[in-house]
Amino acid sequence: MTEASVREFKMPDVGEGLTEAEILKWYVQPGDTVTDGQVVCEVETAKAAVELPIPYDGVVRELHFPEGTTVDVGTSIIAVAVGDGAAAEPVREAEAPAVPEAEAAPEAEAAPEGRQPVLVGYGVATSSTRRRPRKGPQAPAQAAPPAAAAIQAEMNGHGPAAPVTRERPLAKPPVRKLAKDLGVDLATVTPTGPDGIITREDVHAAVTAAQAPEPSAAPAAQAPAPAPAAPSSAPVSYDTARETRVPVKGVRKATAAAMVGSAFTAPHVTEFVTVDVTRTMKLVEELKQDKEFAGLRVNPLLLIAKALLVAIRRNPDINASWDEAAQEIVVKHYVNLGIAAATPRGLIVPNIKDAHAKTLPQLAESLGELVSTAREGKTSPAAMQGGTVTITNVGVFGVDTGTPILNPGESAILAVGAIKLQPWVHKGKVKPRQVTTLALSFDHRLVDGELGSKVLADVAAILEQPKRLLTWA
């Protein structure tokens, strides 16, 4: 029988050139047996949340970072014992013997500089991982200061809370998510459920207790100023007397940077048109009864997307990008249609690949899959790469219109406002009609006013007379 060897699984580049990811959730613990392809954790990059599979069989030896830690690509995050002797290794972190500081190589060693091998995608990583020093050689990998308790202690002038070593708290996944959203460390929560399980009520009680002032606290005028930053264990939202501070990270951080870069790099121009879409709304109702669309979601967005695709075919130069390095305009002969989606992690823009080549039922199917995947938080980085033009539907919020900012690398974005019943002159008489306002923002470096106006006018004309989907196709 051969002895077990320890394999270190490194944080892969799950997108194109991403340099770091935050560990959202571990699905395994030290001592668990894992198999090739088994998902061991969920991480969040600047683009999406992704589940990571382990590439070999073995027994988990150690988790190098707790949940909530941001780790550089190429840095080892989990040690797995592989080989015939794997099962004989220590099975739980709490039972493992103390390791001398000099032997704690995985924690002490820095990742070598240069390109690192990755599991998914590609990219370059350097040794700048923001690791937190372990408090002692016997501290388990997931031991960290309780977030809510540490914040409250600092706010009361008592300094950061001491690390707590304990078994993983028992809680169901929805309760764990609630605790994460509220910034509560489950290790600080007193369970009241059966068999020591933490309930939703326990989490809310912990939040209330953390926000309540201590009886012996100094008067407000003499109290020390609240700490401006979250403790080092993981960035979380926290309240002061008059404010709530929310760390900017992950998707929100990337979106903010991208929007600032887009707004101050590409000269934006936005044009508007108000259009009678009564016939389009009637066609939507008819398509819902068509057997070709059985089981598919048919809504106004479907026909708006098709109208934009037809307008692009009639005006192909709108589907382009600006290559600053080469000083060239790159006209795309395909359309990857982006759909802006608001998710709990922030705004993302997945796109439908080769949308121009899809039939209307195929487009309906792709839209349905895109929306459901985004709502579940399962949109992959690949689904958000390579977009050429975008639609943002602000009408779902009851908003009439807006001035959308271009998705970086694209030349146009169409905003769709709320569809409302309004008085409208129709065939010489004022009648109640379904009306909406469209707004098209475009990059004025490569799209002039004439081209932008033609595209917007074509979309409006199709929505007013949807039979043009046939005559202009």
Image: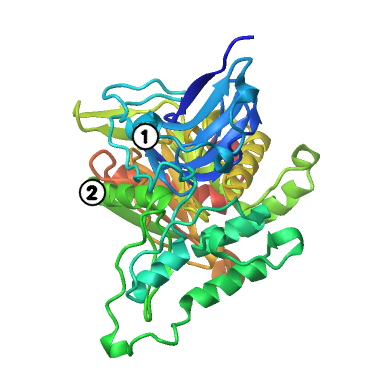
State which quarter of the image contains the C terminus: top right
- Quarter of the image holding residue 332? top left
- The kind of residue on which mark 2 rests is Pro
As drawn, the label of residue 267 is 2
As drawn, which residue projects farthest toward the top? 1
Observer-nearest residue: 59 or 426?
Answer: 59
Q: What's under tag 1, amino acid-wise?
A: Leu
Between 310 and 259, the one lying in front of the other is: 259
Q: Is residue 467 left or right of residue 215?
A: right
Give coordinates of residue 397: x percent, y percent.
53, 65
| Mark 1 residue element | loop
User: Badges 2 and 1: C-beta atoms under 8 Å apart?
Assistant: no
Secondary structure of residue under mark 2 = loop
Q: Residue at x 33, y 68 (%)?
A: 159
Q: Position of residue 77 (x, y in %)?
A: 45, 34
User: 29 or 166: which is nearer to us?
Assistant: 166
Q: Residues within 10 Å of mark 2 (few under 14, many from 20)?
A: some
- The picture places residue 22, in percent across and down from the top left corner, at 43, 44
Q: The N terminus appears in which quarter of the rendering?
A: top right
Quadrant position of residue 118: top left
The residue that disc 1 covers is 18
Is residue 16 visible in the rendered image? The answer is: no
Which numbered dot is residue 286?
none
Which residue is painted at 30% across and 45% down in the image? 450
Q: Is residue 404 above or below residue 157?
A: above
Number of callouts:
2
Q: Is residue 270 above or below residue 82?
A: below
Residue 110 rendering spot, x and y as whole percentages: 30, 30
Rounded to the nearest whole Å, what is the CA distance between mark 2 and mark 1? Answer: 27 Å
